[in-house]
Image: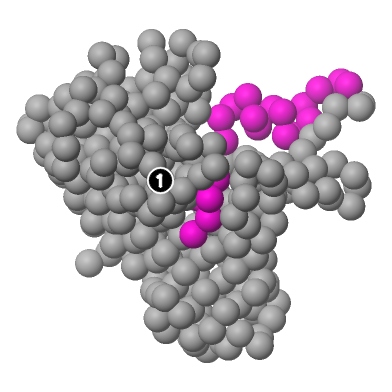
Amino acid sequence: MKTIKVTPNDDLQRILDSITCPTTIYMTNGTYRQKLWVKCDGVKIVGEDRETTRIVWDDYAKKPHPDGSEYNTFRTYTLCITGEGVTLENLTVENSNTAPEKVGQCVALSVNAKRFHAANVKLVSTQDTLYTAPFPDDLVIRYSGLTDDATYYDGFIPKEQLYMEGESVQIYEKCTICGTVDFIFGGAEAYFYDCDIISLGDRRKCGYVAAPSHSLKQERGYAFINCRFTDGGADKGTIYLARPWRDFGKCDFIDCTVGEHVSPLLFDKWNDTFRDKTARFAFCNLGGGEFAPVCWSKELTRAEADNIIECFRARKRSFNVQ
């Protein structure tokens, strides 16, 4: 595999656009203030040190685009992945906006690929930190402009970031993910193993970790295994582990520890919807407090939880990850 060493003074997007074969990008320490899009398959991006090798940008949903329209959530990323089999290691990806109640969503990492792996990566933002494709079908229609109405706003999202047929499997190991509202969201089959999930303070005094949008046809959704949900400034009892962005969103929480910032109810149904009737939220062996989970969630048996853990291990083996 070809290796390219880069510094913060390099035009990393130009280098990424020149790649035509599996390549390792080794990033030396420093702040790379660049908005990046990885399109090539088989790219591995490795930082010298997670805390001091940082990719930083500051776009936000309410930012005006040159055509006069707002950016919307899905243009705000600092780093976007559409190449298959991309790996990130030992670095931080950050959206530096800190006032989502004023500027809207601020995505740090947007993964629009069928296979993706992150290890020892830190993701930092506030609202909508990590997006895990695919889009819900209704948003594909909304943003692609599939209509006879010539005035219909199509969202100006490139097709490479909008269309993704088939399943998406993403693995996050020993990562730290920080945010406030819906800061892990999307429809991928995604496994978070041995991760630190940090809820930051928010002026709205209420936050949500995961916002899944899985189809009913998907057997697997989000699985948080051996993760630690910790307080990074959120008030006691103000955070929910998940709320369904779309009907049938699926989340499993297995062998995790939860701080006092998390509500005893654990889950929320999403505003005035009826998604409590369809959401697939479950847990097993949560530590850290006394909980009174909503009646529409499920407590997994040990056998059911172990089956999900084995699915994670099988997916990891298929990635050829040690």
State left or right for residue 183 relative to residue 39.
Answer: left
Task: Name which residue lies at 19% across and 50% down.
Answer: 226
Please provide percent x and percent y for residue 149. Answer: 88, 21
Q: Quadrant of residue 320?
A: bottom left
The front one of 178 and 224 is 178
**Up-down relation of residue 17 to residue 237 (above or below):** below
**Up-down relation of residue 139 to residue 258 (above or below):** above
- Residue 24 in sight: no
The front one of 117 and 75 is 75
**Up-down relation of residue 287 to residue 37 (above or below):** above
Mark 1 lies on residue: 234
Please provide percent x and percent y for residue 41. Answer: 53, 64
- Residue 50 in sight: yes
Task: Name which residue lies at 48% across and 79% down.
Answer: 53
Q: Quadrant of the C terminus?
A: bottom left
Q: Quadrant of the N terminus?
A: bottom left
Q: Mark 1: few, some, or many residues within 10 Å (few <14, many ≥20)?
A: many
> Type of residue at label 1?
Ala
Please provide percent x and percent y for residue 286. Answer: 16, 38
Magenta residue span:
124-149
Q: Is residue 189 one of those drawn in magenta?
A: no
**Residue at the farthest left position:** 302
Q: Quadrant of residue 39?
A: bottom right
